[in-house]
Amino acid sequence: MTSGIRTPRTPRRRLGALTATVAVVAATALAVLSATPAQAASPLRSLAEGKGKYFGTALTDGDLNISGEMAIANTQFDMVTPGNEMKWDTTEPSNGSYNFGPGDQIVNWAQAHNARVRGHNLVWHSQLPNWVSSLPLTQVQGVMESHITTEATHYKGKVYAWDVINEPFNEDGSLRQDVFYKAMGSGYLADAIRTAHTADPNAKLYINDYNIEGENAKSNALYTLAQQMLSQGVPLGGIGLEAHFIEGQLPSSMLANMQRFADLGLDVAITELDDRIQLPTSSATLQQQGNDYATVVNDCLAVTRCVGVSQWGVDDGHSWIPGTFPGYGAATMYDSNYQPKPAYNATVNALSAGGTTTGGTTTTGGTTSAGGTTGGTGGNCHVTYTKNEWAGGFTADVVVANTGTTSVNGWTLGFSFPGDQKVTNGWNATVTQSGNTVKATNVSYDSTIAPGGTVDFGFQGTWTSNDTSPGSFTLNGTACS
Ligand code: G3I
């Protein structure tokens, strides 16, 4: 089965739409022209971490045995999405019979390489076993909830985020008439997210789709859905933009589109980036691909709540593109001989521009009332608390920077709410509340904060009359500056 991804319908990105971005892209293009691609001194993951983001890849179990691919993956990426190993046809091939072996192998790789895991996925019309699609409709909800609960519980504490719902929309913004929709109508979406949240309250829960990178009928429908979910208290945490692009055809509205989702208080992530080229490639198309990669990375860097970029696969030799789009290929940053391409150079340059980010910045625009506050004087930490609120609800993004010279190994951030906030769920930390006092403790994959490094966690909550942000913080009991 294939996902049926079609050519993006949005037009070529408009030059001049965003002066800063264009300037960086232009600089990148020059670098692409003048530099022979070679491995940079710093891996992509370190460069991304320096900006408070991650850089990921997709890996299959088969990839784990391919030394050329793993030589790259082992060093370059700090996030992994299993290519197929957590999908329903692998994890529950027959009713109630689960197989987590393949997915566990990917998790093992992640843990051995200090990488996060993006769980992919829990509910999708594709790679869905026939026994599910042929169920009597009255049984679908129970089966879906059992599947989500069992899988999300198995991976509890090991995944950073789940693509709870994958590719639910048609291109016109209507919902796919898959077995879940037929059984439950649109209510299956909230039910799936709530069920996943009950199983793993700390995982960030996403809806992931393709052709939603720009503003169009499909992303508009998703935006409306996300607004509705948040207003109903559904613990939706993020939007995954797959970003399966065609060289030279990135949507011009990608940055604005990402920002409007971020302004709802959601994370956004580039989850499956590739940029296919009509074969044979030329230096011009490879260079344009580099510009495209730089645009994607720069757009993510420009949106505080864009948490990171993942490429779909490691190299051109193992990409899904040629098998699905005959005549196209060369879609990744590395060629079939595992050599970095201009897209890699462009990515390095984009991640390297403008220095290192040591704290969050406040998002602007849209309908949110975002506000950043920083802590008082004290120890070797600095905290930026960025709030997005709406009537009765809010999300908070908290960036903790280690301003000292030694690693923080294991952390608890303490603070008090000045208002009547109540935390309902958190991500990247275990967040507990007693009265107005809140404690956020690291989870397994972000327990260390290197000197000069940061961790980023967040939570969602409710409030009634006062959502004033906390003004002081402690890290492991010592006040932060
Ligand atoms: O497991 C069978 C194997 O038993 C059989 O011999 C072989 C023969 O073709 O097929 C194997 O299944 C393949 C499966 O990957 C595992 O390798 C399927 O045919 C093949 O269609 C499937 O492709 C995957 C595709 O999703 C299915 O939609 C790709 O590897 C995977 O990269 C791709 O990933 C998706 C994301 O999950 C969602 N977004 C789009 C993205 C690209 O399509």
Image (cartoon, grey):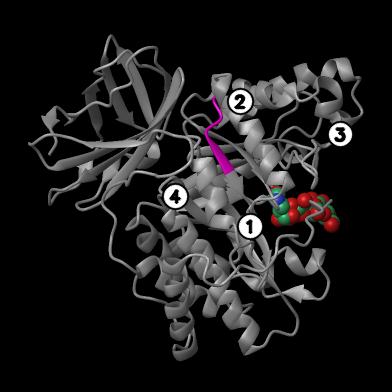
Query: Residue flagged by tag 2: what amino acid is it?
Result: Met
Residue 125 screen position, x and y as percent: 80, 38
Q: Are marks 3 and 1 in contact (CB under 8 Å)?
A: no
Lower sequence index among marks 4 and 2: 4
Mark 4 surroundings: few (<14), some (14-19) or many (≥20) residues within 10 A: many
Q: What residue is at 13 percent from the left and 48 percent from the top?
A: 404
Which of the two marks, 3 or 4, is nearer to us in this view? 3
Tell me where the magenta segment starts and ends, as one range.
234-239
Q: What residue is at 26 percent from the left and 13 percent from the top?
A: 436
Examine the residues drawn in magenta and state their main secondary structure: loop
Q: Which residue is mark 2?
A: 229
Distance Cα–Cα, label 3 vs label 1? 23 Å
Mark 1 surroundings: few (<14), some (14-19) or many (≥20) residues within 10 A: many
Query: Residue flagged by tag 4: what amino acid is it?
Result: Ala
Q: Which residue is mark 4?
A: 115
- Provide the secondary structure element on which disc 4 rests: loop
In the image, residue 80 above or below residue 229: below
Q: Which of the numbered marks, if any, corresponds to residue 177?
A: 3
Which of the two marks, 1 or 2, is nearer to us in this view? 2
Q: Which residue is mark 1?
A: 243
Work out which residue is located at the far top of the displayed protein and give it: 435
Q: State left or right for residue 394 relative to residue 6.
A: left
Residue 314 screen position, x and y as percent: 58, 65
